Image (cartoon, coloured by chain):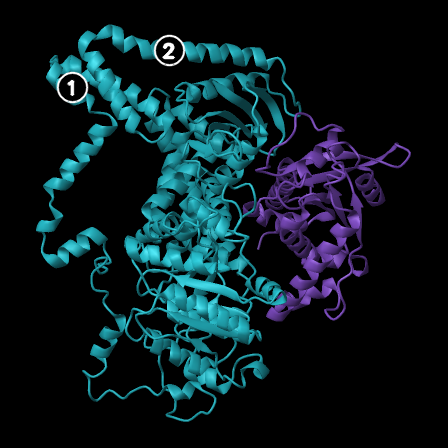
Amino acid sequence: MADLSLSSPEVQIALLVVVATLVLIVILKLLSGGKRGSAVLLVGPCNGGKTTLFYRLKDGSTGLGTVASMQENEGLVQVRNDKDRVVGSLRVMDLPGHPRLRSKLEQYLKDASAVVLVVDSVELTPNKTEAAEDLFEVLTHPTVARRRIPVLLACNKADLETQAHSVDFCRRTIEKQLDTMRKTRLALGGDAGRAISALGKADKPLQLAALRSPISVGEISAEKGEVAEVMRFLAKLV
Amino acid sequence: MLDYVLAFERGGAILWALQFTSLRHNPLEAINALIRGCLLEERLGENTFTFNPKSGAPQTLKWTFHNGLGLVFVAVYQKTLSLLYVDELLSNVKEEFVNVYKPGQRGYRQFDETFNRLLRDAESRADAAKKQPVMRSGPPANAKQTGSQAVGAQAKKGAQAGKDSGDDDASAARKGAANGAVGNTSDGSAGGEDGDNSGGEDNVRAFDVSKLPKGMAGRGARGVRGRPVPGGAKVPDSGKKKEDAPAPKVKKARNWNTLLSSGKGDTPTRIDYTEDGDGPHTASDMDLVSGASASATEDEGRGVGVSRMDVEEDEYDDSEFEEDEELNNGAGRAGSGAGASGSAAAAPKKQGLLASFVNSLAMNVVGKAALSRADVEPALAEMKRKLMERNVAEEIAAQVCDSVGRNLEGQRLAGFTGVAAFVRNAFEEALSGILNKRSVDVLLDIKKSQARGKPYVIVFCGVNGVGKSTNLAKIAYWLGSHNIKVMIAACDTFRAGAVEQLKTHCARLRVPLYERGYEKDPAKVAYEAVRQAEKDGIHVVLVDTAGRMQDNQPLMRALSNLISLNNPNLVLFVGEALVGNDAVDQLTKFNKSLSDLAPTTAAGGGGGAGEGTGAVGRGQADGSALTRRHGGVIDGIVLTKFDTIDEKVGAALSMVYTSGAPVMFVGCGQTYVDLKKLNVKSVVKSLLK
């Protein structure tokens, strides 16, 4: 065996190679945009106003309007407190609501710091099943349950006053849907049962306020710019 | 002429819009319908989309993508107009817009002028193209014009007609130049669309199907499977079984009593005779009887075991997959390196060797160059071959490959991925997206209708011999294990032994059977069964129907009648996993016949409308509301005989893509517990292996 001292050329070359490889790996990681920070997710059924809300939060305006999203939007939002001072910035992600792109939700929940469920308060009843399913998937996700990620149920389109349902109605409808869903999914047993414990005990009717992850409810209008509830929610996270 | 032009990001933000005419409905409705109904459904191969607004005339939408920047350009115009220049205009707009585009900016007022200029250019070019042939070849051209206009009038889509008449003129002009005689050119004027058809017909006539021997005629007309000719004698499957039984006299009859809890009868012997012995997927009788199942309480009465629907599948082993991935990637990168340099060298021969090497290096290593169609072609062709090997129907494989190709065009590779790996990832996403459909939560819906006090009606339909009755029994077992009261309605009043088969199942499952014997109207039997169920407080009614060929009009009409009369909550199409290209045909024809042949109701008016208004809560079919019906009557698919295929799982993809309905149940054996959910990850893995 050769003398393995630091002065010998073989050891030096070996060390150099190792260091070079490490440096290369670090560079690649930075280049590949590994922004593994936590993000706030905007989820909800189709046509709820997620993309509108996203642009309202990010730019302060809705521009020329939006169409159904085919892909997620990501951006930095300047969070303002009640006195309209910027307290920080958060990364916000707007996920498409189409069922075909539903698999992205699970993927992004892994490093979410908070979730905003945007529902259309005018067309609540036809979409209540999907809204409840989204909420169900969010709440029973292991990461969410473990970290007790806060959730905000934002009832959008409050500007259509007469047609929009009240916040209480939205909350109760979603609660009822979740309750029924909990009972049926629990019956299936297996792993699903463990995850559902995050939704509270099955014998009591489900209360959003009583769940492990703190869930708040609020009404907003992304179109008209009344998004104070969301701003307050985000301010708590900064 | 044009109603509306729009440029938007894939993320949803509208970048630029121009409205030409005032419409009664919100123009964005059409765009949303396009996105939800077509662009997101991997149907990028079609290049027009028709939108029927609630008020106003139908509109046609054409679009183009800029995949590099993630932009979409859409032009909307009235369907009745046939505008020839739209495609060209859209591509010009795309090129011009890229020059002014700045990421993050929304609202490009200055682009209006550019667009108007492009529009004027395109319109004038289209007019010039129309006028030119008339001036070139005098009298024959007039005859050609009228001839081709007649052809054009026959064509279905207005836009297509415009294109075809243009093509007719061009091809006829060429033929005229070659022959130089009016007679010939007038024959040639029947060219274009019609010519192709007549040519095709000639071919068929030359090969006279009726002259073939009887058996071959059936096979030729039907396909490989050789199913019985429609309307003819329905070969009873039970007949075949009866033939086999008495032949070997020494064969000991199997005693089925071993499956019941009493344990009377012979000791169960090995049933699985495949080479590897008792496979893990077929539970032997011994296991079932000895109660190796988890929940003992529910099965004491049955003694058969927990339905595999309720058993969580082993989480798909990611580590094992990654090993394969690496091997494939290694091979893929080597292959793609060779492939990319090969294709780069083959196509433009002018590029020197050094240039092509740098090009492939640029793509694979640095990821700067945008992918062109030629780069992905070999990988796409490979993928298509792979999919077809896995029993995906040929046209579905072609459509999926085409739409993935369109998505990839113009995208940039991330650093260090080869073309093959990139294409493979795109395919994985596309296939997962197609198969991951929002499935109806049956148990939830049953509870809802329980609350309303009405029975939940499920109808099973499909072609002959796919396993409707068997899987119906399995689903009855599964529902029963969740304490749901089930009733079976025997609406197969045609096939000998169908009712007895269901009687046997009902005796073993201990569920009531509603039957009226044979030769009765199935629709009425189902109706009375539902009424009986309501009286008895039954939660779910499972309706078994006779198997029928998708081409058999009277039988499809009868089925459609049954569905519209009883208004079931769920219509399940039962298809076997062994089916090949016929899957597409079966599903399209079932969907089409069931909606077209629906009897008109007083309130409805049209066949489709009758179906729509008669069926409460069926949702609209315009793609805007999230409907369970993707433009069809079938709500879900039951994929049967899944245990007979190992990796050739392509039928699942064909069926889901064609109908838009999710696969709700998978039958994987012939005992009651052999029912499970579709495991999308493992299906996609098998398809891409």
**Which chain is rendered purple in the image?**
A
> In the image, is residue B586 above or below residue A97?
below
Residue A153 picture location, percent across and down: 75, 48
Left or right of B42 in this view: B467: left
Left or right of B110 in this view: B373: left
Q: Amino acid at mark 2?
A: Asp
Q: Amino acid at mark 1?
A: Ser
Quarter-of-image position of residue B318 = bottom right
Residue B262 picture location, percent across and down: 46, 92
Instruction: Indicate which disc, 1 or 2, sits on the residue closer to the N terminus.
Output: 2
Q: Colour of chain B?
A: cyan
Quarter-of-image position of residue B17 = top right
Q: Nearer the viewer, residue B400 or B463?
A: B463
Mark 1, chain letter?
A: B
Is residue B307 visible in the rendered image? The answer is: no
Residue A135 picture location, percent across and down: 69, 53
Mark 2, chain letter?
A: B
Residue B190 picture location, percent across and down: 19, 24
Q: Nearer the viewer, residue A55 or B333?
A: A55
> In the image, is residue B245 above or below residue B408?
below
Is residue A173 visible in the rendered image? The answer is: yes
Q: Secondary structure at mark 2?
A: helix
Real-space CA distance between mark 1 and mark 2, rounded to the nearest whole angstrom: 24 Å
Q: Nearer the viewer, residue B615 or A147?
A: B615
Residue that numbered label 1 is attached to: B186
Tell me if mark 2 has few (under 14), some (14-19) or many (20+) residues whose alpha carbon lies within 10 angstroms of its own: few
Residue that numbered label 2 is attached to: B127
Tell me what residue is drawn at x 48 percent, y 74 percent: B487
Q: Are marks 1 and 2 on the same chain?
A: yes
Left or right of B19 in this view: A84: right
